[in-house]
Amino acid sequence: MNTKVIIFSAPSGSGKTTLVKHALDIFGELQFSISCTTRQPRGSEVHAVDYHFLTPDEFRQKISEEAFVEFEEVYTDKYYGTLKSEVEKIWSQGKVVIFDVDVKGGISLKKYFGEQALSIFIEPPSIEELERRLISRGTDDTETIRIRVAKAEEEMSYAREFDKIVINSDLNEAKKEIESLIQHFIGS
């Protein structure tokens, strides 16, 4: 049974989700791990497709059952986590698990899975470019963008804790780089 995982982490606005979707399109042997969260669904998000949406009490119950590979309480009662059962389900299908997680989650997952994991940090070309991308998205107000940029600066200090750093200054180049990294990792 293949028991490998690929972890993508990045500051918000780095292009991580775009690159994860690209990897899923290219490699049929990858399967996305659906995380749990206690936040409310946004837009057209669907339970058990985008996230497993849980109440804070349901999440805490799963913590007490040691059901998570990793979890984090980002704000009071705002939890995110990865279920062990989700990983085992994907492995049982003969697939490689792919994670799209925040930086702290990525570090936790790498520690948990060790050599079974390839951890990739997606870095924006600069903080200024990251801020420009967040503004052009048009989804956040000025204060939220300011907070995200400050958090991104802190998150970028953890890049060296990942196996590979991909600087996403040119999306096509970044796609080629992650294709090569994944091919090498799952081909071995």
Image (spheres, rainbow, N blue to C red):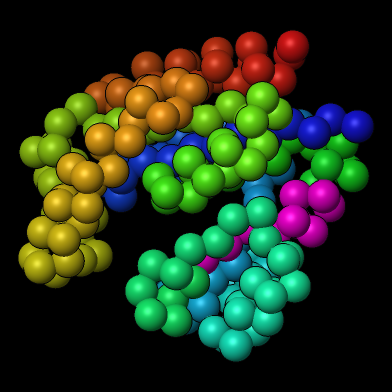
Q: The N terminus appears in which quarter of the rendering? A: top right
Q: Main secondary structure of the magenta part?
A: helix
Of 17 and 91, which appears nearest the observer? Answer: 91
In x, y percent, where is residue 186?
71, 20
Q: The C terminus appears in which quarter of the rendering? A: top right
Of 156 and 26, which appears nearest the observer? Answer: 156
Indicate yes or no whether the magenta region holds residue 87.
yes
In x, y percent, where is residue 23?
57, 32
* Res 21 seen here: no
Quadrant position of residue 184? top right
Of 91 and 44, which appears nearest the observer? Answer: 91
Of 182 and 119, which appears nearest the observer? Answer: 119
Going 18% across and 43% down the picture, which residue do you hit?
Answer: 153
Please give the range of residues in magenta.
80-89
User: Along the horizontal axis of the image, is 135 left or right of 36?
Assistant: left
Going 63% across and 41% down the picture, which residue do you hit?
Answer: 112
* Res 1 seen here: yes
Q: Is residue 141 above or below residue 150?
A: below
User: Along the horizontal axis of the image, is 89 left or right of 173?
Assistant: right
Q: Is residue 140 above or below residue 4?
A: below
In x, y percent, where is residue 179?
55, 19
Tag count in the figure? Answer: 0
In x, y percent, where is residue 93?
88, 43
Q: Is residue 104 above or below residue 15?
A: below
Going 10% across and 59% down the picture, which residue do you hit?
Answer: 146
Quadrant position of residue 63? bottom right
Q: Is residue 27 above or below residue 111?
A: above
